[in-house]
Image (cartoon, helix red, strand yellow):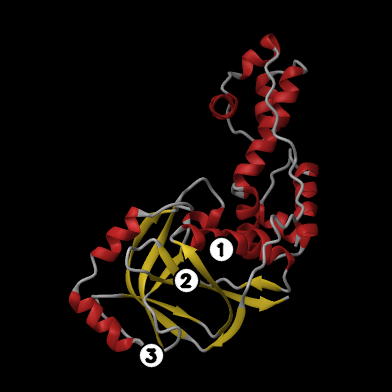
Amino acid sequence: MLKELNDAMDYIDENIMEDLLLEDIFKSVNVSEYNFRKIFYYLSGMTLNEYVKNRRLSEANIDLLKGERVTDIAFKYGYQSLDGFTRAFKKWSGFLPSDIAKNRFIKTFPKLSFSLTMKGGISMKFKIENMPAFNFVGVSKRVPMQFEGVNNSIVELAMSITDEQREIMHSLQNIKPNEIVNVSYEADHQFMKEEDYLTHLIGILTTDDYESDLLDKITVEANMWAVFPNEGEFPRTLQDTFANIYSQWLPSSEYELVDAPMFSFSKLDDDNTHAYSEIWVAVNKK
């Protein structure tokens, strides 16, 4: 996957002034869109759209220093109007395009290059589970994506669950891991734009075909799942493991992601600061 990521960066730079479609990037390196966007996001810390925009504005900065006309540069890099380019450039650099040549302001955004560095000798323990088709059943809401600390929106969601809903979920639960799980899916534009919300469901796994207005349902096909156990300070250890799956394990493993919601569960100690957790990610062998 690292070679494919670097090849994609080359493709973007070679076509930076073209009408660059994200689908063309995936095709150029022959990788699935779902795998690429997830791994790119967790390795780079930005969406692919953000990266392309930053590279274009960096190249535009160079052209402005050369004294090229602002209008020509705006259309050269795909902006439909001078005002749109000016707003984007000002937001990115802090300067108006017209100020660049006169004051010699320079801001650069170099092409990314990916390499795998195992910081501190990270060892990722995992097991493979083959699961039949099942449903997630529970309560859900749109919440902000948050990669560090306690997500208060998820806490509020958990507190909103009624006794009646809990009883129904308990009666339906009939498949491992037989725990109350947290499920994340439907990220805004699938990490492709600068949006930051996803849908979060708290519920159970069941093979029953449950239908009710009281609870939401997500159907998942039979899949192979990679299961990552972890134990330590909560939620930091869980969040670190999640990040390492995408930034360390997937790029170097023999597996690739399946387009299915990932889920996790945590068993907390009495003071809610330490937990045993598992993260379940749907995968296929490459």
* Amino acid type of the residue that numbered disc 1 sits on in the rendered structure: Thr
Q: Where is residue 126 drawn, in percent x and y?
A: 61, 76
Q: Is residue 52 above or below residue 222?
A: above
Q: Where is residue 247 drawn, in percent x and y?
A: 65, 58
Residue 206 located left or right of residue 221: left
According to the image, label 1 marks what residue?
A: 241
Depth check: give the residue in front, 216 or 77. Answer: 216
Q: Earlier in the sequence, mark 2 or mark 3?
A: 3
According to the image, label 2 marks what residue?
A: 277
Which label lies toward us, 1 or 3? 1
C-alpha span from label 1 to label 3: 27 Å
* Amino acid type of the residue that numbered disc 3 sits on in the rendered structure: Asn
State yes or no: discs 2 and 3 in contact (Cβ < 8 Å).
no
Depth check: give the residue in front, 211 or 93. Answer: 93
* Amino acid type of the residue that numbered disc 2 sits on in the rendered structure: Ser
Residue 95 located left or right of residue 209: right
Q: Bin the neighbour count of mark 2 within 10 Å (Cα to Cα): few under 14, some 14-19, many 20 and up.
A: many
C-alpha span from label 2 to label 3: 20 Å
Q: Earlier in the sequence, mark 2 or mark 1?
A: 1
Q: Where is residue 280 drawn, in percent x and y?
A: 53, 74
Label annotation for residue 75: none
Q: Earlier in the sequence, mark 1 or mark 3?
A: 3
Tell me the element at label 2. strand
User: At x 45% / y 85%, what residue is drawn?
Assistant: 134
According to the image, label 3 marks what residue?
A: 174
Tell me the element at label 3. loop
State yes or no: discs 1 and 3 in contact (Cβ < 8 Å).
no
Q: Quadrant of the N terminus?
A: bottom right
Q: Quadrant of the C terminus?
A: bottom right
Q: Is residue 179 above or below residue 142?
A: below
